[in-house]
Amino acid sequence: MSDHSVETADKDFREDRWPASLALLVCIGLYILLPASLTIRPWWLIPVIEIIPLITLSITHRHRHPGEPVWTRTVTIAMIIVITLSNIWSVYFLVHHLLYSTGQATVGRQLIFNAVIIWTTNVIIFGLWFWELDRGGPGVRGTSGQSAPDFQFPQMENPKLAQANWRPRYLDYLYVSMTNSAAFSPTDAMPLTRRAKALMALASLISIVTLLVVASRAINILK
């Protein structure tokens, strides 16, 4: 392919923002379902911090592309950081309530419900991390301006497994996150960089704490 063809392909590249925006909106909705004792107070602070820039970007920059302003990616990463920290906060206080609460029957049911919310949020969040960081982000991924890959997908090893010019989208990264959180190891795409491995390790750690410690203990309380 000539340099002119590559430049034209890069210029025409667009990736819809809405799947990731919808995922972040789901995280906000799940956060609202948590009891106040597991959220950063006031409870509405995190949703407001997330929703305002989310709506703004969804309206003004509906697509990710090589020519997107730098600030749009910076804001997107900032939103992911905020929701990540809020979920870690929820995990900490969930474990705290497990250790020190006395209403065993009620707490057991609540722990299961809250653990499911936190685990689901964890899957979505790290899907967003993988989507935003791999090869420089969705704006340049698959173009001549991309950086070294953070994940190795089967379609990258064997082009016959996918259509021409295949690029991973958010759903692909969500699946990677889900399998990593469920199996505590990569099953679809292999991490290639230290930051990818660190993120997958953190996601697995949160999942282990939520599922194996909190949920298992809550089920035992119900017996």
Image: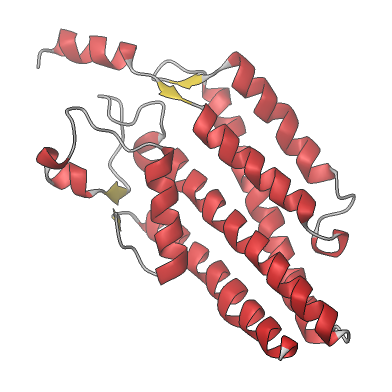
Instruction: Tell me the quadrant of the picture where the C terminus can be found.
Output: bottom right
The residue positioned farthest toward the front in the image shown: 223
In-front residue for pair 165/41:
165
Which residue corresponds to the image point at 53% horizontal and 19% vertical from the top-left?
A: 62
Dividing the picture into quadrants, the one containing residue 161 is top left
In-front residue for pair 132/218:
218
Vertical side of 165 occupied by 112: above or below: below
Which residue corresponds to the image point at 88% horizontal and 87% vertical from the top-left?
A: 102
Residue 75 picture location, percent across and down: 61, 31
Res 221 visible = yes
Dividing the picture into quadrants, the one containing residue 26 is top right
Vertical side of 63 occupied by 91: above or below: below
Whether residue 178 sits left or right of residue 30 in the image: it is left
Vertical side of 40 occupied by 156: above or below: above
Res 201 visible = no
User: According to the image, what is the colour scheme of the structure?
Assistant: secondary structure
Residue 159 picture location, percent across and down: 12, 38
Query: How many badges with numbers are in the image?
Result: 0
Which residue corresponds to the image point at 77% horizontal and 41% vertical from the top-left?
A: 47
Residue 140 picture location, percent across and down: 36, 27
Whether residue 73 sits left or right of residue 102 in the image: it is left
Which residue corresponds to the image point at 31% horizontal and 62% vertical from the top-left?
A: 187
Whether residue 196 sits left or right of residue 128 in the image: it is left
Residue 94 picture location, percent across and down: 74, 72
Vertical side of 113 occupied by 139: above or below: above
Instruction: Tell me the quadrant of the picture where the N terminus can be found.
Output: top left
